[in-house]
Amino acid sequence: AQSVTQPDIHITVSEGASLELRCNYSYGATPYLFWYVQSPGQGLQLLLKYFSGDTLVQGIKGFEAEFKRSQSSFNLRKPSVHWSDAAEYFCAVGVYNQGGKLIFGQGTELSVKP
Amino acid sequence: DVKVTQSSRYLVKRTGEKVFLECVQDMDHENMFWYRQDPGLGLRLIYFSYDVKMKEKGDIPEGYSVSREKKERFSLILESASTNQTSMYLCASSFRDMNTEAFFGQGTRLTVV
């Protein structure tokens, strides 16, 4: 069965430090992979997506993610975190089944220290 | 600007009530989804629909049903609300092609007392 695992429930980083959020997926075919961000009281916003081609994808707000097929991973990175990045981050895999549906991970809550 | 609109931000209902959560999208999307969001559990798919009158069960359909009579509207129904259905409910929509993103509503926080 398809699944997504985000091993870190909560991460705290200092402002200006680098960030990496982990995501592992289980899916038999070539995956469609997404990262979404949810700020407090807000809906989910797409940060970036991977379908094929270059395994390093760039997104909004200075985020990037790298697809590693051998490790079944799609980790999110940012070189320098800003206080406004504090939010919950969700990794998702797209599954084709009479249309498409998204399977989400458990989410990682990011806190940013001044 | 694309929009997915959920009818209520906050709802308080009593145990045993029949509850309707409404979602409308204005993007002519084929796919529509209902998710439930709980701390530490992420988003769990309740039901999705890939066309009018078509529906598929997600991972946690028990206690819920859905209706899609028009392409733009997808309703989630709690037949007899229970306290364990207290949660945040998120609606989303997308084109059928997975090469596009899903757009989410703001969510409905439902409390069952």
Image (spheres, coloured by chain):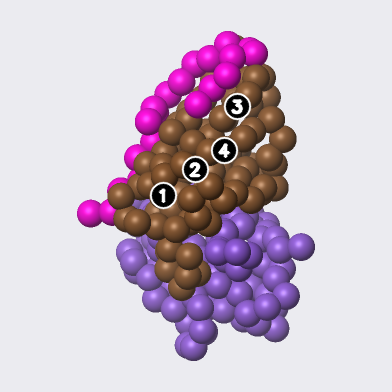
Chain colours: A purple, B brown
Q: Tag 3, which chain?
A: B
Q: Which residue is mark 2?
A: B68
First in sequence: mark 3 or mark 1?
Answer: 1
Q: Tag 4, which chain?
A: B
Q: Which residue is mark 4?
A: B66
Query: In the rendered view, would you say A64 is above or below B33?
Result: below
Camera-side residue of A42 and B20: B20
Residue B72 spot, x, y in % from top left: 38, 47
Disc 1 packing (10 Å; few <14; some 14–19; many ≥20): many
Q: What secondary structure is found at the residue carrying circle 2? A: strand
Residue sitting at 60 percent across and 68 percent down? A96
Q: Are the residues at dot 2 and dot 1 in contact (C-beta closer than 8 Å)?
A: yes
CA separation in Å, label 3 and label 1: 21 Å
Part of the protein shown in magenta = B1-20
Q: What secondary structure is found at the residue carrying circle 3? A: strand
Q: Tag 2, which chain?
A: B
Amino acid type, label 2: Arg
- The answer to which image quadrant residue A5 occupies is bottom right
Amino acid type, label 4: Val
Do the residues marked 4 and 1 share a common chain?
yes
Seen in the image, is A1 located left or right of residue A102?
right
Outermost residue on the bottom side: it is: A53
CA separation in Å, label 3 and label 2: 15 Å
The numbered disc on residue B71 is: 1
Residue A80 spot, x, y in % from top left: 38, 66
